[in-house]
Each structure stands twice: as C-alpha cells, then as structure tokens.
Amino acid sequence: MNIFVDFAMTPGALAALREGTAEHQLLFPQTPAASVLAAPEADPRFCAAEIAFGQPNTKAVAEASLLRWIHVSSSGYTRYDNPQFRSLVAERRIVVSNSASVFAEACAVHVLSFLVAQARNLPAALKTRTGNGTPVWNELRQASGTLQDENVLILGFGAIGTRLALLLRPLGANVVAYRRHARGDEIVPVVTEPGLASALAQAQHIVNVLPDSSQTRHFFDAACFAVIRPGAVFYNIGRGSTVDQTALLGALRAKRLKAAWLDVTDPEPLPDEHPLWQEPNCFITPHLAGGHTNETTSLVRHFLANLHRFVRHEPLVDRIM
Amino acid sequence: MNIFVDFAMTPGALAALREGTAEHQLLFPQTPAASVLAAPEADPRFCAAEIAFGQPNTKAVAEASLLRWIHVSSSGYTRYDNPQFRSLVAERRIVVSNSASVFAEACAVHVLSFLVAQARNLPAALKTRTGNGTPVWNELRQASGTLQDENVLILGFGAIGTRLALLLRPLGANVVAYRRHARGDEIVPVVTEPGLASALAQAQHIVNVLPDSSQTRHFFDAACFAVIRPGAVFYNIGRGSTVDQTALLGALRAKRLKAAWLDVTDPEPLPDEHPLWQEPNCFITPHLAGGHTNETTSLVRHFLANLHRFVRHEPLVDRIM
C-alpha cells in the first residue's frame, strides 16, 4: 500500500518506520513538515496515498480517491473535527485514528507536576534563600500542602484524565470528572452539565483537559470563573481556545484564582507583551505536556501497531471517525 | 501532669493544645522558641515537668527528675541521638517519641514534586517562551519524560520513603529501598550494604531520606558519586550532613549527575556565596519539605493522641527510644 507520511521525525523514528513498512511504499512530501502539529500544503504525491500518517491537508483528502485510512500524528484533531470533513470521510468510508495514547501518559504526568508543584509552592520555594524559622520560612511552610482530601475537578475525561485520576489516587485527592455525556465506565464520579456549577464551586483544583471544538470555545469565560470556589487553582492542559484569557486574567487579578498553570494558550506561543506573562501566579509551559524522549519513535510505533491491525481488518486503537 | 511545651505554635494550635490538656498543667518557657527545630536554653520551670513536648534542652532533661516522656516536635532528633542521651533515658525510663508521622505525608509529596518537576523539565519549561516546532521546543519535549520503567532508589525507608513508594506506584517506576537492616515488611525490594553499589549504578533517581547520625555523615561522598549511574538525578530530603557537598558539586560539574534537588543543605540556609546556588541544574528549597497548612495544629493533634495513649499506658506512635 502507498503510505503518505508528512510529519517531522528523528532519524531513529524514520528507520523504525522504514523497517515496519518494508512491505509497503512510503511517500514523502516535497516540503517536509515542521512539526507533528504543522498543517502542510497540499502535495501532488498525496493523490496516490491509500494511507496517510501525519497531518494531511483536508483539501487533499477530498481529492485522494484511493485513501482508506488517516492516522493523525497528534492527540488534537481540530483541523478534521467539523461536519464537512466528518461527512466526507463517512461517505468515502475513510477510517480516521489519532495518536491520543502516545501522549496521554506524558500529559498526565505533566499536569501532575503542575498539581504537586503548586501544592508544594515550588516556584516560590525554589526562589527563596530564607533560613529556618524566619517569618518568610514559616509562611512558605504554612502555604504548602499535600493534595490529601482536596477536591480536583477534571473537565474532559478521556485517556489523559483517566491516567491523571489514577496518578492522584494515592495522594488522597477527591477526584470528580466533568463530561458532556457520562459513559458509566469512568473510574471516578462524573458530573454532566446540570452538576457543573456545583462541582466548580467545590473544586480546589480545576483541571481543564477539554479539546478544541465549537462547543468548547471559551468554555471558561467570566461567568464560569464567577462560580468557581474562591482561591481555586486552574490548570489547562487541553487547548488554549477553551479559555477566555481576559476572563482568566481578571480572575487572577481579583485573586479569585490563587494560581493558573497553563500548558496551552491562545495563541501559541503567547506574545511577549501578553499580560499573563506578567501575572505572578500564572505559570506557563509552551505546549510541552505530551512531549517525551523519543516521541516520534513512539508515534511511529503506535502507527505501525495500527497498520498491523489495519491490514488484518482489526479495530484500530484511538479511532476517532 | 505537668507538661512543658517549648515550641512556637499558631494561636489555633495553642487553643487546641489547651483544650486537649485541660486536665493537665501546661508550663511554658520564659523565652519562647523560634521554631519547632530550635534548641532552647535550659528553663528553670523545666524541673517540674513530667512530660516535655518540643525540643527540650538535653542538660535540663538530665536534671528533671520527674520527667517520664519526651515528645519531640520534629521528625529529626539528632540532638538526642547519641549514646549518652540514650543511656540517660534508658536508665531513667523516660520514653521518647517524635513527630515523624506529622511530616511524612508532606515530605513525600515534596520529593514527589521534585521527581515529577524533573521528569517534566519544569524549571526550563517554565522559563522558555519558545513556539511550537522550534528547535528549542523539540529539544525540551525530547528531554521530558514520565517515570515509567525508571529506577528509583530510596535511601532510608521509614514513613517518608514508604509513602513515596506508594505515591510512585501508579507512575510505573521501579522502586528499590536501601536500609542498613531489612525488616522484611517493606513494600518494595530492599538492598543492604552489599547491594548498595549495584543499586546506585542502576538508579536513574537517587532519593536520599537518610537521617543525620555519625554513621550517615558524608554518606554521599566522592566515592559514592563515582559509582552512580551517569546522568542520574540526586534528591535530598533527609539531612544536609549526609552529603559531602564538594563531592556533590563535582558530580554536577562533571555532568555525572544530571541534576540535584535539595531540600536540606549543610549549613542551612546555604550561604549566598555557596557555589551550589550557581549550578544551573541544582534546585534548592530551604527545608520546606515537611511544611503544611496548620502544621503546628497537626503537631499538637499528634501529641494529644499520644498523650491519650500515654495516660492509658498504651504504646506510643513514633516512639524512638
């Protein structure tokens, strides 16, 4: 089969891909993609593709008559998550999967690092040189905590949220998930729309793992920050577009939020002059959550495992359409 | 009974102490202690004490003929951990307990915060403003990890080490403990002296929870850092005296250690001109690990629970002598 591959990978990952696809034909774009997230230009070779691995151009997908399967090289898939694309792939019987499993563990550990760094006051603790017994020292110790008996609300409860809940279990936190529709197989109690305001009012830690979609745009707006528990901490590991950053800034300035930890912003990177950079209790990592050593090799392995399933007509892991 | 109390506490903690000791007589020193760790001057009222709660002066203990029980208001007890004091309390049948349980949870979460901050590269990640797809961004993602399948060696395996092992369990780390004597009830595999060099050579993460004693002084010396796995990360949450800081500095400069995370140093605080402050991969919090909200109230609660046991002749929690 012809496999069109359009994402940047390390030489090791490429070698693994070549080895795992020896029975197939790899097609590469004329202009290589800059990252796993880049939206490439349409490429003339794409029309021969039966499988696309990467971030294929949506227009090219419509024209590629041989295409049977798209494996997206990221967890997010906003580019494809619209009625036109969905009906196109449904009509053409193109299967679509993504790489959610590849990033879930690193994302969950990243947000855990935010939660425990906040609990232990790491940003302030790593800066001070105060001595034992000083007023500053007593204050820092006093402001430190564990997560025991604290309420953590996770919004969006897929692979990342589920892993996070498991990582939080031995810490003794009370974890609740928010989903649009409860499935019944979640490992923690779930609230849906009617229970959301009450859950927000109780949570000391609000972990946003919502994906980007027309329904989630500015999900966290001024009205939402108005009902949160005063002194709560906000974490965003989902997508920047789900937060009205002006409302977030207001909540931080009014000390309604004690702190915010953001791995995603809108736009990315946040411009140097953006006021969130200046907020003393706003901590930002630039979309690093899913990152891990040999990431592109993990992506290739995940694709190859799915390729193995695809040729055997077995169900794909992380199928999204 | 007369209870001599010599540690600084919040008004809330003091109220709890007064309420819980209403049937007894509280004696306070003329000069209040500066912190739970302070070594106070001998106080004339101490001679009437039957119970001492805090950090009693060792000379005063020798002279207090009514004393039956000392409850130390810290986890460390170096001041009392010597043959003279041990034989004094043995001879006089004075029971000694400490506050290890009070600090174990916060200490374990503190070192967990170090471990996951290191795994997610937080110090560098929180500083950069790089955009998605840049070489710096790819490098940062590449250098990030999870703790899955990584070897963590915990040296000293009491309440803190045990809690840490439990917190690390869902992260999928391979935890091994080092103890002088294995008890057989540890929740992870234990190595003793003969297995130490091999365990050090395998560990990606070396967590030092050793207490201060004549046997542990400079436990981590140049010879020890010479056998560790190159690129390992060192964490110290025990006592600063257990580390030869010149050897530590050398291991960091030689990049034999990838990073060091220290909550304890020798001395504390580390002087401003100390070269460890300048090491880019050395991260220091000034003895904050055990700290938590309402810490002195927790100390009082722990003491009161032990007081309850003491008056009933039941075994004390955290008895050390």
Image (tube, coloured by chain):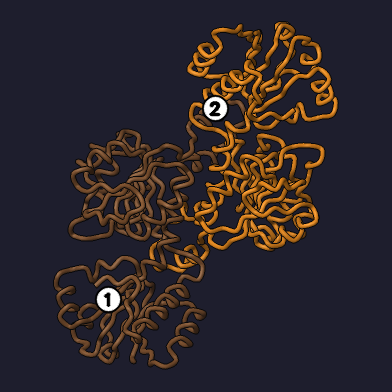
Chain colours: A brown, B orange
Q: Chain of mark 1?
A: A
Q: Secondary structure at mark 2?
A: helix
Q: Secondary structure at mark 1?
A: strand
Identify residue for label 1.
Answer: A96
Identify residue for label 2.
Answer: A138
What amino acid is at disc 2? Asn
Q: Camera-side residue: B97 or A232? A: B97
Residue at left 57%, top 43%?
Answer: B163
- Is residue B261 placed above or below A20 in the rendered structure? above
User: Where residue A77 appears, x then y in whole percent?
Assistant: 28, 68
Q: Camera-side residue: B160 or A249? A: B160
User: Where residue B178 appears, x then y in whole percent?
Assistant: 71, 50
Residue at left 80%, top 11%?
Answer: B63
Q: Does the rendering let one see residue A30?
A: no
Q: Quadrant of the N terminus of chain A?
A: bottom left
User: Where residue B301 appears, x then y in whole percent?
Assistant: 54, 23
> Which dot, 1 or 2, sits closer to the camera?
1
- Is residue A48 placed above or below B219 in the rendered structure? below
Residue at left 24%, top 38%?
Answer: A198
Q: Does the rendering let one see residue B101?
A: yes
The disc, 1 or 2, on the residue closer to the chain's N-terminal end is 1
Q: Chain of mark 2?
A: A
Q: Quadrant of the C terminus of chain A?
A: bottom left
Q: Camera-side residue: A29 or A97? A: A97
User: Where residue A199 appears, x then y in whole percent?
Assistant: 27, 40
- Is residue A268 placed above or below A92 in the rendered structure? above
Confirm whether circles 1 and 2 share one chain: yes
Query: In this image, B178 relative to B24: left or right?
Result: right
What amino acid is at disc 1? Val
